[in-house]
Image (cartoon, helix red, strand yellow):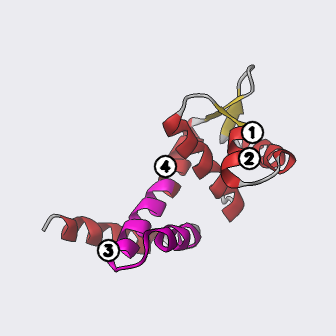
Amino acid sequence: MALQESGEMYLETIYVLSLKSSAVRSIDVAEEMGFSKPSVSRAIGLLKSEGLVKIDDSGYLKLTEAGKILSKRIYERHTVLSQLLIRLGVDEKIASEDACRVEHYISDETFDAIKRHMEKYSKK
């Protein structure tokens, strides 16, 4: 399943919010992303139809196992790319913004090479 960049952003946001609180609602996602509640509701519906998110009886969002795997991968890309750019001397805010754009388009092969490089040289 190939999600568009916006779907990946929603998944990543739900994942990050779920690290801070076990109770994540659509309104939390809307506030975090700066989007309207109707826009978030539509996106959540699409993620739900893809089998990536569940909504419990209380309206809380839960990532499915597939959603967790994908969102962790996206978040890992973001954090590794941000760290790389910061180590290169890029301002932290700009590094995070740039990593956010790159994380959705970089190939697995390139990302894995960057990750190996970061692991190799962070041990020194």
Q: Position of residue 8 (x, y in %)?
A: 63, 56
Question: Which residue has dot 4 on it?
Answer: 72
Q: Position of residue 112 (x, y in %)?
A: 37, 67
Q: Earlier in the sequence, mark 1 or mark 3?
A: 1
Using the rendered view, name the quadrant where residue 97 is placed.
bottom right
At a point 66% along the width and 49% down the height, the residue shown is 32
- Calculate the distance from the C-alpha at mark 1 to the C-alpha at mark 4: 21 Å
Res 87 label: 3
- Calculate the distance from the C-alpha at mark 1 to the C-alpha at mark 2: 5 Å
Task: Kindly identify the amino acid type of the residue bearing the numbered disc 2.
Answer: Ala
At a point 46% along the width and 62% down the height, the residue shown is 77
Q: Earlier in the sequence, mark 1 or mark 4?
A: 1
| Labels 1 and 2 touching (C-beta < 8 A) | yes
Helix, strand or loop at mark 4: helix
Question: Which residue has dot 2 on it?
Answer: 30
68 with respect to 44 (left or right):
left
Decide which of 87, 6 is in the foreground and name it.
87
71 with respect to 33 (left or right):
left
Helix, strand or loop at mark 1: helix
- Closer mark to the observer between disc 4 and disc 3: 3
Residue farthest left in this picture: 124
Decide which of 53, 31 is in the foreground and name it.
31
Res 27 label: 1
At a point 78% along the width and 47% down the height, the residue shown is 40
Helix, strand or loop at mark 3: helix
- Calculate the distance from the C-alpha at mark 1 to the C-alpha at mark 3: 35 Å
- Calculate the distance from the C-alpha at mark 2 to the C-alpha at mark 3: 31 Å
